[in-house]
Amino acid sequence: MLVVDRLSKDYAGKPAVRELSFEVGPGEVLGLVGPNGAGKTTTLRSIVGILPVQVGAVHVCGFDIARFEVQAKGNLCWVGDDPEPFDALTVEEHLEFTAGLYRVRDWRSRAQELLVRFELANKRSALGGELSRGMRQKLAFCCAWLPRPRLVLLDEPLSGLDPRGIRSAKEAIRELARAGTAVILSSHQLELIAELASTLLILDRGRKVFAGTLEQARAAIRPGGTLEDIFMAATSEQQGQEQS
């Protein structure tokens, strides 16, 4: 579903991502983790086309996003860490707009199911500018789930959600994967990554320091350790190498 090949990105001459390569297959939930400034958000924004690809390539379902942007974006959805809906559109109008973008026919019944699932059914007439932080997040989920994308990218998706919303979002992510959707889940909540991710990608200072399953990470980095133990060991080791 996704192939990232030697992706590099600089800001004012300072490297944010350096020669990053990885793949995500159907039904895989990739947990993307790393310290602040590791390049996680830059990577996600490059994949979805918010940032132009400077060096390397990104292919979504076989489409190079730099050359076939419409086709690539038609197969993916993105939920940022602080969704900003249109102030003047209602919740329902956001779903109608999304259905139009992705050419989803007979979208209303699915939209209703999503509104119920994410507890927004009684907010269908509320304007985007009236929504709380948690409701904006839930609306972003509804819009991302509506077209049944083949690739979904989630950046800190549980921020602002109450316990009920967190539980619902977790199950919705699992269902996406079971249906064959590839998911990239980026979060500092390592317990969330350990619970949902089938594979890990650990970044530090723009470089890949580990890619594989949690069990492979334990074997290679910290036998018997938790994901937090593995994270601390992998990133500390990388920092020590760069400082020496």
Image (cartoon, rainbow, N blue to C red):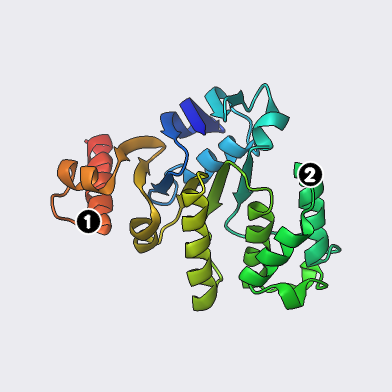
Q: Is residue 156 visible?
A: no
Residue 16 percent coordinates (x, y): 48, 36
Q: Residue at x 52, y 46 (%)?
A: 41
**Label number found at residue 79:** none
Residue receiving disc 2? 101
Quadrant location, the C terminus: top left
| Tag count | 2
Q: CA distance from mark 2 to mark 1?
A: 43 Å
Q: Residue at x 55, y 28 (%)?
A: 58
Which residue appears farthest toward the right when viewing the image?
88
In the displayed structure image, the side of residue 230 where residue 16 appears, left or right: right
Residue 181 vertical placement versus 85 (above, below): above
Q: Residues within 10 Å of mark 2 (few under 14, many from 20)?
A: few
Viewer-side residue, 100 vs 12: 100
> Do tag 2 and tag 1 residues touch (Cβ < 8 Å)?
no
Viewer-side residue, 220 vs 205: 220
Q: Amino acid at mark 2?
A: Leu
Q: Amino acid at mark 1?
A: Asp
Q: Residues within 10 Å of mark 1 (few under 14, many from 20)?
A: some
**Label number found at residue 229:** 1
Q: Residue 112 appears in which quarter of the rendering?
A: bottom right
